[in-house]
Image (spheres, rainbow, N blue to C red):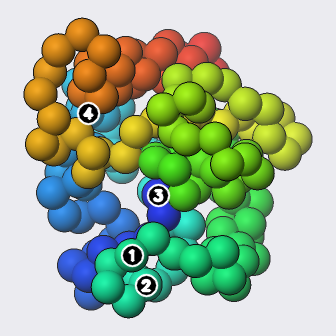
Amino acid sequence: MREKHAPKRKKQTRRIPFVGRAGQLLTKILQSVDIKREDIFITNMVKCRPPGNRNPSKSEIETCLPYLETQIALINPKIIVTLGNVPTQHLLETTQEITKLRSQWFDWIGEIKIFPMFHPSLLRNEGTFPGSPKDLTWKDIKTLKQAINKF
């Protein structure tokens, strides 16, 4: 299960999460380690686009939380991959930045593990060099794939 903060305009119109440029990049990242998009569930932290394409407020997140909790309960994932600060900070109840939390495993409700990664939109304009977000994401997706293979 992958989770990001809020739908973008195109996604809200199509009702499919991650269909824009960041979604296309996410699909390529997944494919690079033989994870098919149709084999995972992708959702948003909030279910509607905040005005001005801003990050959702705490009250907007809290309003949508029961729906998200129901989705998680129905899917019963072993792993939730949070993409970016908003879902990571909210689910882990922390103010630490994604740069400090990424690539670590966190125990969550029941047996669920949370694995934070950079949001793909951060990677679009980044170069690739050792320690860059793209380089770290490549390492993260390989770590994730190894964990998935154990299940």
How much space separates mark 4 and mark 2, taking CA atoms?
27 Å
Relative vertical location of residue 5 with respect to residue 28 in this rendering, above or below: below
Q: Which disc is residue 4 wearing?
A: 3
**Dot 3 surroundings within 10 Å: few (below 14), some, or many (20 or more)?**
many
Q: Horizontal placement of 2 versus 113: left or right? A: left
- Quick one: SS at disc 2? loop
How much space separates mark 3 and mark 2, taking CA atoms?
13 Å
Badge nearest the viewer, 3 or 1: 1
Give whichever of 122, 47 is nearer the camera.
122
Amino acid type, callout 3: Lys
Badge nearest the viewer, 4 or 2: 2
Relative vertical location of residue 126 with respect to residue 136 in this rendering, above or below: below
Q: Which disc is residue 29 wearing?
A: 4
Whether residue 81 is visible = no
Indicate which disc, 3 or 1, sits on the residue closer to the N terminus: 3
- Quick one: SS at disc 4? helix
**Dot 1 surroundings within 10 Å: few (below 14), some, or many (20 or more)?**
few
- In percent of width and height, residue 140 lies at 42, 22
Q: Which residue is mark 1?
A: 54
How much space separates mark 3 and mark 1, taking CA atoms?
13 Å
Q: Which residue is mark 2?
A: 50
Question: Given contact means CB atoms under 8 Å apart, are the residues at marks 1 and 2 in contact?
Answer: yes
Q: Horizontal placement of 60 versus 56: left or right? A: right
